[in-house]
Image: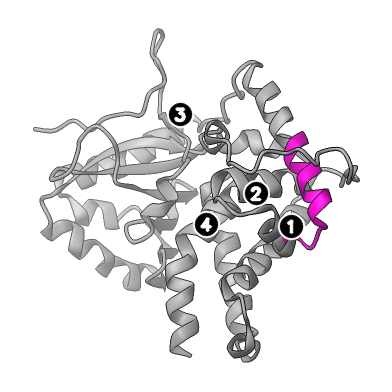
Amino acid sequence: MPELEKLLGEMRPRLHRYCARMCGSVIDGEDIVQDALAKAYAARASFGGLDHPQAWLYRIAHNAALDFLRQRARLPPMEAEDELASLATPDAPDPEIAATCLRSFMRLPALQRSAVILKDVLGHSVGEAAAITGASEPAVKSALQRGRERLRAVAGEAAEPALPGVDGALGARLVAYVDGFKAGDFDGVRAMLAEDVRLELVTKLRRHGKSEVSDYYGAYAAAVRWAFAAALVEGRPAMLVFDREVSLDAPAYFVAFEFAGGQVAGIRDFLYARYAMDGVEIRPLLTPPGSTGACPTPQVP
């Protein structure tokens, strides 16, 4: 169904922006988006008769996010909203809330979180937010007001605690992997792969097994435009990729890893999913005394 596939491609970055804030993670948000897109495609028979296909997609993504949070026990108890409490809620989105740290949204109950994201981050109307969440408009207005108040209160509190890092041995393996990219030693990089390694080039392809994944490095070996730095993305081992033709001050995208037994067991490359940089939390692999904890920059010869 070409129309549905076109819509899924166009909507994917916006769905990710919503899901990442619902779960507090750009990486987990991608998992939710993939689940939502699969469910939308499974329900494609109903697509042709829809008056508001975008709202339909958001509703699927909203429910997928709630399912994800329930499965991981990260969904705060639902709070009933006073439907008369916020009849004067402003119609305009709040631009300060749009810049809120992803993990701060996790301090809100689900309806408040959803209302604030849909209104202040994505620019939906209260009526559209009600259609997506299945709540009444007065309930969404109340949730929006309370969610905004809570996020403003959170902004006045101490910063969110840093996510846990990685141990020294794992950090050393990550640095060795990234150093292989820097030196163009892709045979050495391939030697670090587990036999059952899994690769996801997000939005494009998946590969399983060392022999299949080995070909993935060809494009990087042939390119000179990229620079690399080891880092933590949401507390997970990762490689930041910088585009020399654009900027060496901010990464263009990242590659996240899973390690097992000192070997690379999982690779998730966001080259074609750069929307995941929106709101991502990046820290240096090591934070020396006096460091600001700013995003690391690559060493460029």
Q: Are dots 4 and 3 in contact, CB under 8 Å?
A: no
Q: Amino acid at mark 2?
A: Met
Helix, strand or loop at mark 4: helix
Specify the quadrant of the image occupied by residue 170: top left
Q: Amino acid at mark 4?
A: His
Q: Which residue is rendered at x = 32% and y = 72% of the image?
A: 211
Q: Main secondary structure of the magenta part?
A: helix
Decide: is 270 above or below 215. Answer: above
Mark earlier in primary sequence (3, 2) = 2
Q: Amino acid at mark 3?
A: Gly
Q: Residue furthest top?
A: 290
Residue 168's tag is 3
Residue under label 1: 66
Give 15 or 185, whichever is nearer the viewer: 15
Residue under label 2: 22
Mark earlier in primary sequence (2, 4) = 4
Is residue 74 covered in magenta? no
Left or right of residue 53, residue 78 in this image? right
Label 4 or label 3, whichever lies nearer to me, is 4
Specify the quadrant of the image occupied by residue 151: top right
Q: Which residues are magenta?
A: 133-146
Give 215 or 75, whichever is nearer the viewer: 75
Decide: is 169 above or below 134. Answer: above
